[in-house]
Amino acid sequence: MSANMKTPRRRGSVLTLVVMAIAVLTILGFGLLTVSLGVSQQAAMIQNEAAAMAAAEAGYEKAVFWMSKQTDMLGALEDADASGTLDFGNSQCDYDIDLVAFIGSSPVYQVRSVGRSGRFTRTVSVHMIQAVGGWSMGMCRVPSGSSSTYPVSYAEGEVIDMPIHINSFGDPEDSTRDIHLSGDPLFLRPVSMGESRYSSGGYDKYAGVIDVFDNGIYFNQPASRITDPVTVRQKVERFRDSTDPRFRFTPKGEAKVKNPLPTVHLEFFVQGGVGKIRITNNCTVRGFRQDRDERTWDFKIKDGDPSKFERYYIYAYHLRPKEADDTGDRFVVNVEDTYVTQTFGQIETEPGGQIYVDGNVVIGSGDITLPSPQDVVKGRITVTASGNIWIADSITVDGPRDADGKPSADNPNVLGLVAQGVIKVIDPGMPDYSYVDDTPKGWDKDGDYSKYDHIYVPVGLNDVGYPPSTYKRHLPDPTVVEAALTVGGGGWGAENVKRNYYGGRKEKSSPQDRLVLRGTIEEVLRGVVGLIGRDGYLKYYYLDERLLTGILPGNIWLRGKYVPLPAGWQDTRAAAD
């Protein structure tokens, strides 16, 4: 009996164990399924969040690319819907661009891009400004004829203390370098190129010279829009329209000389701690032009086409109306009298000086009766001309300086020069060359101007042994220019540099003087400054870092590159419940 009673108990125990095992396995299975599902969901969440961020960044890149293609960003924001949508299937984004502020006169744009994937949203918000280069050019070449150019080299002994940008010349992947070197010039800042380092066949164009660029060289960079006449025209027209009507000039140029060029003469000086300008309207430049291409380096682009060129009339000397003081053609104003603001919607720039000339401009004084210091700018001002701007003496800014001679960071004074023609340093010897005139029109050795309606205006410095009124002139060595230069019709350089035994500048220190530039340059192509060891100038160019801060009035920057402000990048995440 006892034995027969034990069997059912064992069977019942086994059944209980089986049920318990099944329960444990079921619970474990559910746990594993839950863990697996959690891992899958976590992976999907990570994937969706990454996709949302990638979409947001793609929208940002698309917006910046759109900005780089606009002829004028401020105008584009007024005329176009600066927004868009991208769809990547498992993710999407919406982006938009707005003007939000000015730093000085430099616009600040906000690019906002919202990426979505699943229940995740990532938002990228970036405050950006237009990149300001040091020396930007469409090509590192000078015109040599109506449709031909010649490479210009950075030479041994030259110091270039400013970032350089050169647009691609021809095919970016051709086998020829777009920057040209003679010896070992000193580049103290980075260099950026529109072209590729390598040819389409893999040839390294820079293998033999890469060590010259001690501070780096970058390739495939966005182009400067200086080569686009539409961009330049739109910027200039906005500048003109925002200039005080009292300082918009259309000179007549009525003096009876050969090749008359209507011009406004500007003479900067400081008196009693106040920056001033003597403005003389309705001046006339006596122009001179060589009769063959092979006799000159003085070209500008033709009809707005940066691949076509024409010889232009260079500065020989200029005259003013004799009664200019009585007629109101000549007058003195404070620099601050020219101050205006540019307004876009409810946002406006800081005040700054603007002068617009529908014609040509001469800057520099040879009048010893003007208060000293002469040819010194105190204030913030930009001068824009539809024609040429001629530099006729050293022109510097007032205020504190660093030990290296550059204006210090807290110096508030700045000059901008913008020309739809060229910006050139005159040859002071032109009035003295018999192939122009035996003596300048409107000049009298005894100072008797009774028979003249227009009289000769000396610029620069009188030669030793000659009176202040003489036409025997020279420029200082070094000639110093402190300005931001924008040259929409050609290049920055010096006029009448020798070519094939024709021309030839009058230097103070033979065979070459020194040209010191502290500022920035933006030009369609290079202008000739000098011939190494033979004629003209040696270059000493230095970046004025203050120009990167928006200090310059007028907003005529033309780089196609936009960069985030320091600490200007923000991104945020959000997930729906």
Image: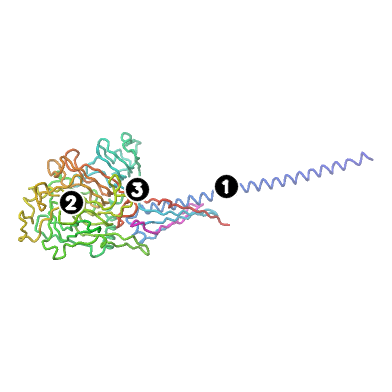
User: Which is more toward the observer, 485 or 209?
Assistant: 485
> Magenta residues, as a range?
84-106
Q: Quadrant of residue 108?
A: bottom left
Q: Secondary structure at mark 1?
A: helix
Q: Residue at x 21, y 53 (%)?
A: 375
Q: Vertically, is 209 above or below 34?
A: above
The residue under label 2 is 392
Is residue 494 toward the left or the right of residue 557 in the image?
Answer: left
Viewer-proximal residue among 497 and 327: 327
Q: Which mark is residue 43?
A: 1
Q: Is residue 397 visible?
A: yes
Tag 3: amino acid: Pro
Whether residue 388 can be seen here: no
Magenta stretch secondary structure, dominant: strand
Find numbered disc 2 in the image and state the secondary structure of the residue it sits on: loop
Q: Viewed as shown, does residue 33 lie left or right of 230?
A: right
The residue to which callout 3 is attached is 222
Q: Alpha-carbon distance for marks 2 and 3? A: 34 Å
